[in-house]
Amino acid sequence: HVPIQPLPGDPFEGYSWGQKAPYRGRLTVESMTSSVALTERLEQMTNTKLSSRQALADLDDDHAVWDHAANALANLCVTLILTTSIEKIVLGGGIMKRKGLIE
């Protein structure tokens, strides 16, 4: 569970599932980039209760929710590089299938 620096003015602190996680699910890569977190962020942004995480699939690639996901992933990559001097990072998971997230 890697802590991250959120984008300026970001009111979202992490997903509701994080109560048992380190940092209590606040401002970590997992609490900001999981499909649960992104759905909850979208609900906060739109002030709408969504019925499922499927709503993420319908978002445009340039929706602001992806900027926050990209920021958290960038924080993770920088932390890995600075702490371990790695040469390659492999990212996976359903969210990584989003076109344009890693470019």
Image (cartoon, rainbow, N blue to C red):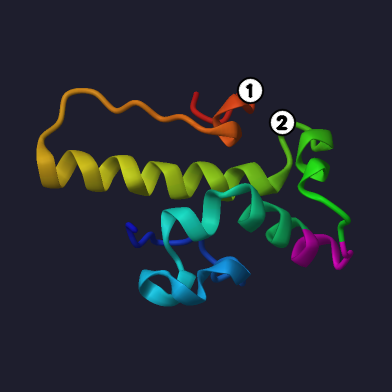
Residue 27 position within the rendered picture, expressed as x and y whole percent measured from the top left:
45, 66
Amino acid on which disc 2 is placed: Asp
Residue 13 vs residue 11, the one in the foreground: 13
Relative image position of residue 32 (x, y in whole percent): 53, 56
Above or below: residue 99 compared with residue 29: above
Q: Which residue is mark 2?
A: 61
Query: Residue 44: within the magenta?
Result: yes
Instruction: Label 1: state its secondary structure.
Output: loop
Which residue is at a point 55% across and 30% down the rendered structure image? 96
Question: Where residue 64 sits: x, y (%)?
Answer: 69, 47
Please identify the residue farthest to the front as the structure is shown: 20
Q: Is residue 50 above or below residue 69?
A: below
Image quadrant occupied by the N terminus: bottom left
Which residue is tagged 1?
99
- Which residue is found at the position 32% from the left and 57% from the top? 2
Number of numbered discs overlaid on the protein picture: 2
Q: Amino acid at mark 1?
A: Lys
The magenta stretch spans which residues? 43-49
Q: Residues within 10 Å of mark 1 (few under 14, many from 20)?
A: few
Q: In this picture, is 19 found above or below 7? A: below
- Identify which residue is drawn at 59% across, 66% down: 15
Task: Give the left or right position of residue 57, taking residue 11 as reference.
Answer: right
* 88 magenta-colored: no
Q: Is mark 1 in CB contact (under 8 Å) with mark 2?
A: yes
Of labels 1 and 2, earlier in sequence is: 2
Which quadrant of the structure image shows residue 28? bottom left
- Residue 36 location in percent, x, y? 65, 55
**How far separated are the C-alphas under marks 1 and 2?**
7 Å
Does residue 35 sit above or below 11 in this rendering? above
